[in-house]
Image (cartoon, rainbow, N blue to C red):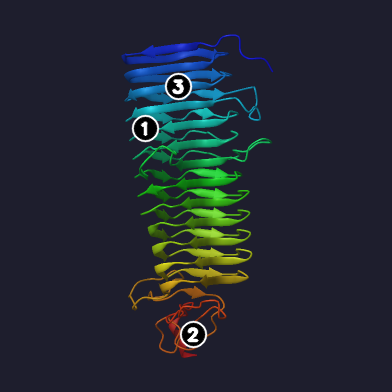
């Protein structure tokens, strides 16, 4: 494969403001397709940026930028190792990238030291390394994008990743990921050294390794996500503190649904764990964790713990509809709990604490939930 004959830029914008480029047609066979430097209020739409050697669009030191409804791809194919990416942002702030197709490249979007940007309804799947790679960037919103099938013969890719650079001294702060889809990657969502990130309503499945993978991160909220059919872990959390894992459906993951290791201050509630082939939840070297109002169904082992300190599997009874429709919140629903509710409050009263066949080594569930029954059935 030969190097493109033109190693310049198809479009170059520098030190400019309030420029719109639209309907320009193809920009291809350059080293960079479009380059924007030290500018603001730049709008690029309805473009076809194809087969540019390094990146289709490069932006440095840009504010209030918009790119939407563009096609950014390469017919070199995603197995070509030297190919760049669709959009490359450095020090870009308060900008919008939406409804664009960025595929068949090394990465769909690379974001470095850029803040308060909005990435909406893009397709950045079918890339080699990353769908979206974010480094040293804060308070960005990533909403309703598709980052599936980021892998190739040469790479095992990540769908959406926020990662700390080696030269950075602090974490990535306050990024939000909402209703994105990431199927058939090595890891669907990857995060390292992050703080205050929120993942809500995403779908992570069919990964070669994990659906979600977090390392050394703090104050993370993981809520209402669907995590299924991943080859190792549905969710893997290593290190960090102040975790809120709430309202997720974690099902049919091959090894473990949720594995948390060497972390503190975990709130694990209102999740459904179902048909995870080996373990639903594995807790290793944790301290100060609440595990309550979750549903555990149809797994070889529901939960195992090792070297954990201060894990509480139930709270004081709260008059509120619980995870299986009962009238009170207290402990968890376990389909292997065979005790009885003797007073009609939808909480088990016999065979407590529940220890999941001795797998819970630090106490147990003193308020296991039972499936609610109608009053006339109780009387019978």
- 35 vs 235, left or right, is left
Give neighbour class at mark 1: few <14, some 14-19, many 20+ (Cα, 10 Å). many
Name the residue carrying label 2. 377
Tag 3 secondary structure: strand
Give neighbour class at mark 2: few <14, some 14-19, many 20+ (Cα, 10 Å). few
| Residue 239 percent coordinates (x, y) | 44, 57
Mark 3 / mark 2, whichever is N-terminal: 3
User: Marks 3 and 2: which is nearer the front?
Assistant: 3
Q: Nearer the viewer, residue 92 or 223?
A: 92
Tag 1 secondary structure: loop
* Residue projecting furthest to the top: 5
Q: Are marks 3 and 1 in contact (CB under 8 Å)?
A: no
Name the residue carrying label 3. 58
Residue drawn at x 51%, y 77% as measured from the top left: 360
Residue drawn at x 48%, y 42% as measured from the top left: 161
Residue drawn at x 42%, y 49% as measured from the top left: 199
Mark 2 / mark 1, whichever is N-terminal: 1
Name the residue carrying label 1. 114
**349 relative to 369, above or below:** below
Mark 3 / mark 1, whichever is N-terminal: 3
Give neighbour class at mark 3: few <14, some 14-19, many 20+ (Cα, 10 Å). many
- 154 vs 145, left or right, is right
């Amino acid at each position: 494969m030969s190097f493109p004959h033109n190693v310049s830029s198809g479009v170059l914008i520098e030190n400019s403001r309030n420029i719109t480029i639209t309907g320009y047609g193809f920009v291809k066979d350059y080293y960079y397709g479009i380059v924007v430097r030290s500018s603001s209020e730049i709008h690029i739409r309805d473009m076809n940026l194809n087969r540019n050697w390094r990146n289709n669009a490069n932006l440095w030191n840009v504010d209030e930028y918009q790119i939407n409804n563009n096609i950014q791809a390469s017919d070199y194919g995603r197995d070509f190792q030297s190919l760049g990416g669709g959009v490359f942002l450095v020090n870009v702030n308060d900008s919008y990238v939406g409804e664009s197709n960025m595929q068949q490249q090394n990465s769909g979007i690379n974001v470095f030291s850029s803040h308060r940007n909005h990435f909406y309804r893009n397709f950045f799947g079918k890339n080699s390394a990353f769908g979206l790679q974010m480094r040293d960037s804060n308070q960005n919103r990533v909403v309703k994008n598709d980052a599936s099938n980021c892998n190739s013969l040469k790479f095992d890719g990540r769908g959406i990743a926020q990662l700390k650079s080696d030269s950075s001294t602090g974490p990535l702060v306050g990024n939000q990921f909402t209703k994105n889809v990431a199927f058939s990657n090595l890891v669907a969502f990857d995060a390292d050294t992050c703080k205050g990130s929120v993942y809500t309503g995403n779908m992570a499945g069919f990964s070669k390794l994990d659906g979600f993978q977090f390392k050394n991160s703090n104050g993370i909220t993981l809520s209402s996500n669907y995590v299924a059919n991943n080859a190792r872990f549905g969710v893997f959390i290593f290190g960090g503190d102040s975790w809120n894992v709430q309202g997720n459906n974690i099902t049919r993951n091959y090894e473990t649904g949720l594995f948390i290791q060497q972390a503190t201050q975990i709130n694990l509630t209102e999740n459904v764990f179902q048909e995870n082939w080996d373990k639903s939840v594995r807790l290793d070297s944790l301290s100060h964790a609440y595990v309550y109002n979750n549903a555990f169904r149809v797994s070889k082992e529901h939960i195992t713990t090792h070297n954990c300190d201060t894990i509480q599997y139930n709270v004081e009874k709260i008059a509120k509809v619980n995870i299986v429709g009962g009238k009170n919140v207290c402990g968890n629903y376990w389909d292997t709990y065979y005790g009885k509710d003797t007073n009609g409050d939808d909480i088990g009263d016999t065979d407590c604490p529940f220890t999941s066949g001795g797998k819970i080594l630090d106490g147990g569930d003193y308020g296991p939930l039972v499936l609610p029954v109608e009053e006339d059935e109780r009387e019978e």
